[in-house]
Amino acid sequence: MRARKLFIFIFFFLVFTFLSQEVISSSSEYETDLVITAYNIHLRPDFERNLVKVAVLAEIENFSSISIGKTQIMLCTLIDTGDLRAEVKQIFWLRKGRKDPLNFSIKTVKNPFDAATNISLYELFFREPLKPREKVVLEFVYTIKGKSIKDSFPLGKGETKELYLISDFRWLPQIFIPAQKVGQFNNIYKPEWTLRIEYPSLYVAVVDGQLIKKTELNGNNVEEWKSIIKGFPQVLIGQYEKVKKSEGKFTIEIYTPKDQEIKEAVNFLSKDIFKILQLYFDLYGDSGSTVYRLVASYTTWGGHGLYMGQVIDRNYLKSLDLFTIAHEIAHTWWGFLITSYGEGSKFLREAMANFSAAWALKQIKGEAYFVNALRGFKTGTFCYYVALNRVDKQYPLVIQEGYDPRSIVFKNYQKGPLVLNTLRFELKDELFFQCLRAVVENFKDRNITLSTFIDTFNQVSGRNLTPLFRDLCWGTGYPIYQLVHFESVKAGEKYKTIVRIKNEGDIGVLCPLMLSTINQRIVKWFKVSGKKDKEFSYLTQDKVINVVLDPEMVAFQYSPEQGVKLWESLDESLFGLRNWAWFNKSYACYLRGKYEKAIDILSRYLNEAKELIPNIERLPVFGVYRFVRGFYYLAINDEENAEKDIKIGIPFLFDSLMDKNIMFFFTLTGVIKEAEPEKNVILILNKITGKDFTLEADLDDQSRRQKVNGWKEWWEKEGKYKKLNLKELKNIKQI
């Protein structure tokens, strides 16, 4: 009986062990069992027909423990371009010296980024099942097409022709991974690649790899490139001029349109770009290349990082936006050399890039710039719309249920650098950067998770920082430090100062405080746990006459009374083209009674934007800002300029009664109260024009639109030529 029981036990044990091993062995290191390990790409754009002809050899390997007979390929999907599509002509199976057509079908599935839309997938049926660890080469012959309009992907963007294929477009065949989340990257295999491109000789090409060979054939350039690090190539071909600059071990290749202002801007910025490259090499290690490529693009996308390169909107260069340039340079390390996936993907890319940019510019422009950058991140985290006079909703930095993923992505640019700076406070500079360099050295050209990042920090620092990371990255809490009381009394030959600090927030982090005596200012550090208060004691030579918590307002702590003061303290050199930053600072000055300064700040933005942005007068935000500036002028009794601005804004007030987005702009500026905004708009229109604008509650959309359009016609024909009753506008006291 015992022998039988033993046999049964051993039998089930072996079955269980076999099944466990089967489960373990069949699990992939990546999020799909089939992976594309290498690409051989041939690419030729047709600028006249707005298309790109592509042929790709993709080497596919089976990483699972079972044979696989089919797969699903995504191509030019999962990004909302609206006018980019691929047409697959043929797919071939290359094996054992043969090249055979491969059957495929097209299926549609829900877009994981937008449930209201579908995406197309190519379902491939292999000629023979692919066995474990077996490889096959598939050839994809297809065309990437754009619409036949000037301003469309992939060609013809802006005032000069260019082709720009970023990896986000999925312009190469990729294995489809169903479980994708907004703002969270998958654990995908990073392939090697070679690329052959053929394009008109009047153009130049930029690829984030190494140029191997260049020839000319029938009026076309023919170039061969290969990957330096693993990943997905990004290609730009445009009507640009190429200039090389070298300093020390670095070479910068600059691609610019024929625009003298851009050339002068790039020439001015190049010295600092060399410094930023050297700094990142010193902080994070050798990237594997000393050639950096910068493209001043007509595409109005802001900046986009490549491996040892970037494509940046020419307007950012014209405004000498060195911060954006430094951010994109940092992506060479945080996004390309180190590829993140899963929880905290954006933290390891965008938070790291923004912090790195601020730190780099600290070395170039000084400590004051770094302080200004941290204050900017703080406003973005807690009080982005200062007119609303409230603390912004707080978000974690990793995707979680119950939180809008797009807002989490945005907060990684703002809260993320503050979190990293908090870690720097904890570890001090030398140890903090040792931890970051260790991450790059240990995981160069590999995929990592935020947990891997934290483990490395714990190992290098010799501390358990996991609870702090959990609070800051997965949580939404923050400290709200308040000075309760202080007293400074004689203690022998010195003075003893007792400081009591209360934390009304949920978590505690290190924060500086400043003790001021008649002769000096002394900085100390403190931490109070969430929902606690604590007493601190300090000895000083002289009596302390004042105590200030977070004197430079850079720590990750916030109380509502800081909002206006934070915005007022910001230096506009950090703003670039961000219109809300300009407005918020002007509004903060207005609230502090500095009316002329408020006018000056908003006027400088409006004048600069008018030069850079075509037809800006038609944009709602322009009309809204002009309307607000009218209130600023009223505050200094300049009714002539006030009337000019307010008249510019009135058509947009009418539009706000039909368009909630325009109404939203008005409420964000504080000129219209959030409560009952429509009632506020009609009150203002009635008071300043002397007419009766009433919208009945039961009007349908069509009737409402007809009525408001009638009011707009009256305004254009008659109203705007009459004098406004500005005295009534003063009495409303909206802002």
Image (cartoon, rainbow, N blue to C red):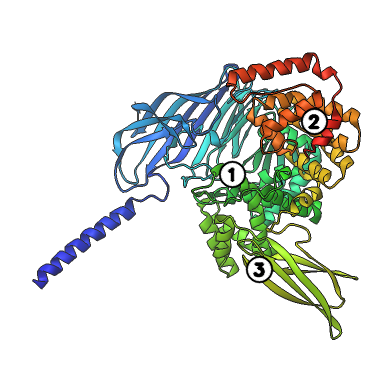
Q: If you read the primary sequence from the N terminus, does the residue marked by circle 2 or circle 1 appear first?
A: 1
Q: Quadrant of the N terminus?
A: bottom left
Q: Which residue appears at 72% of the width and 35% of the height?
A: 672
Whether residue 31 is situated above or below residue 717 in the rendered picture: below
Neighbour tally class for label 3: few under 14, some 14-19, many 20 plus, Cα within 10 Å: many
Relative image position of residue 516 (x, y in whole percent): 85, 68
The CA distance from mark 2 to mark 3 is: 45 Å
Q: Earlier in the sequence, mark 2 or mark 3?
A: 3
Image point (55%, 58%), residue name: 453
Quick check: 439 above or below 544? above
- What amino acid type is highlighted by mark number 1? Ser
The quarter holding residue 670 reads top right
Q: CA distance from mark 3 to mark 1?
A: 29 Å
Looking at the rendered structure, the secondary structure element under dot 2 is helix
The residue tagged 2 is 626
Give the residue at mark 3.
Answer: 528
| Residue 407: assigned label | 1
Mark 1 lies on a secondary structure that is helix
Instruction: Determine whether label 2 and label 3 are within 8 Å by CB.
Output: no
Q: Position of residue 52 (x, y in %)?
A: 54, 24
Mark 3 secondary-structure assignment? loop
The amino acid type, in three-letter code, at marker 2 is: Arg
Q: Position of residue 564 (x, y in %)?
A: 77, 49
Quadrant showing the C terminus? top right
Q: For residue 561, what is the image quadrant?
A: bottom right
Q: CA distance from mark 2 to mark 1?
A: 29 Å
| Residue at horizontal 45 percent and vertical 25 percent from the top | 141
Residue placed most toward the observer, 84 or 583: 583
Which of the pair 645/110 is nearer the observer?
645
- Give the mark toward the camera: 2 or 1: 2
The three-letter code of the residue at mark 3 reads: Val
